[in-house]
Image (spheres, rainbow, N blue to C red):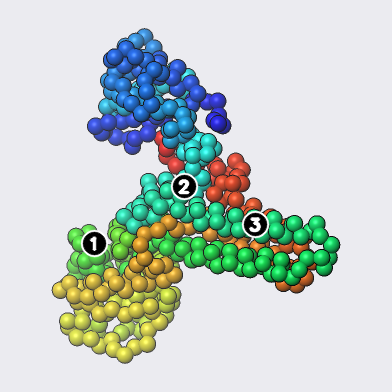
Amino acid sequence: MSFSEDTIAAIATPPGEGGVGIVRISGPKVWEIAGKIFQPLDKTPVSGQPHGTFAYGKVVDADGAEIDTGLALVMRAPKSYTCEDVVEIQGHGGAVSMRRILRRALEAGARMAEPGEFTKRAFLNGRIDLVQAEGIFDLIRARSDRAASAAMEQMEGKLSQQFDAIYEAFLEVAANLETTLDFVEDELPDEVFSGIADLLDRTFRSLDMLLDTWDEGRLLREGARVVILGRPNVGKSTLLNALLGFDRAIVSSTAGTTRDTIEEGFVLEGIPLRITDTAGLRETDCEIEAEGIRRAEAHGAAAHLAIYLVDASQPLDEEDRVRLGKLDPEKSVMVLNKVDLGNQVLNGKWQVASVVETSLVNGDGVEELKRAMAETLEKGADLNALPHAVISERHRDLLIRSHKEAKQARAYLNENVEEHAVLASEHLRSALEFLGQVTGRVYHDELLDNIFSRFCIGK
């Protein structure tokens, strides 16, 4: 069943030059529109082409003049992405060519698709649930192989199956509990209520296991912000270049060379990072350098991981001690650089996750530092396990709310099940309401807008 009478169209390929560009058209008037804008070479109209086939021909304007040549891919409902009749016009890639084909489709009766509307129709027509739709979004935005693998599992429904199992268990508990309301007090044996409580407890364990995947999901989807901090000339820019594998930052023996932050993308053991080199931390009268230091401190406060470098060949400065003391010990790694010149920073009790010795000019200790970074970032997440679907912030919020309601129901069962069965049932219904919003069993327009508005227009 289609939930819209509109036929929508959009460019489905990225902007810019390319060998092929695609305009996607979906909806009840797709055959009428395709017949107006595309003329197959074999004279068989697009509406007469079999499902899953290509027709070669030309795109024409309202007067029959040729706009482009290419292919029309025919997909008939319900065997299409949207579960509606769909035609994809594949022409020569390029901004002008694609705009001309799209404009022609709009002139012929289609309307411009909203962001994510093709995927939204796939959900509304029952092809996918909301969790799978979010998996599509995650795959498009994946920044590492591991993130892409996790998104594929989510698209295939592996995560949805776990949500559905919890939902069905809560539904069974609620149904069993509400059935007891029809009986007179003391008429039911105690094992009936103990069985309800046992099922609820088993379901809590499954719910907790899902919640435990959030840290990993956050890292895979959002990545981590890593900032390199330290006094001037301790090797911060050298470290950035060593991690990236190419010379991104200027390295100089002149103190204060780095005045502003330098950011670069980097993938570490499947975790996408945004790594930032910063100005050397010191007292200065230079306004420009002072602004760079202020930005460095701001980045350090907001980072998922702070790498603090010191020159191990010199005694630790009191300013370093103060700055190290301000870092979150769970999110910081201390690097003792220049140990090839000696190590005078020994036997300290540093409030950091780990301490690594390096000689960056020689390339020593870089791999050890990478392992320390990964271990610090992975706390609460098992990134050594095989790639698997993991929950998002939206899922986590709804699971926590559902968990809270179900726990309240369990508390009522512990107190006096006969007296509080009605209250327990009400909390279970609320738990089901929150769980239903995860996969889309329960949804409202604001929820759908929030999810699909993040998609690109052609998806």
Sequence order check, earlier mark of 2 and 3:
2
Amino acid type assigned to the residue bearing label 3 in the image? Glu
Q: State the image coordinates of residue 421 (x, y, percent, origin top left).
A: 76, 63
The residue labelled by disc 2 is 132
Near-viewer residue (113 or 407): 407
Q: Which mark is residue 3?
A: none
- In the image: residue 298, left or right of residue 426: left
What is the C-alpha distance between the residues marked 1 and 2?
A: 34 Å
Near-viewer residue (226 or 313): 226
Near-viewer residue (94 or 437): 437
Quadrant position of the N terminus in the picture = top right
What is the C-alpha distance between the residues marked 1 and 3?
A: 53 Å
Q: Specify the farthest residue to the right.
A: 184
Seen at 82% across and 68% down, the residue is 186
The residue labelled by disc 3 is 172
Q: State the image coordinates of residue 284 (x, y, percent, origin top left).
A: 34, 71
Query: CB of mark 1 within 8 Å of CB of mark 2?
Result: no
Near-viewer residue (300 or 231): 300
Q: Which mark is residue 244?
A: 1
Q: Secondary structure at mark 1?
A: helix
Amino acid type assigned to the residue bearing label 1 in the image? Leu
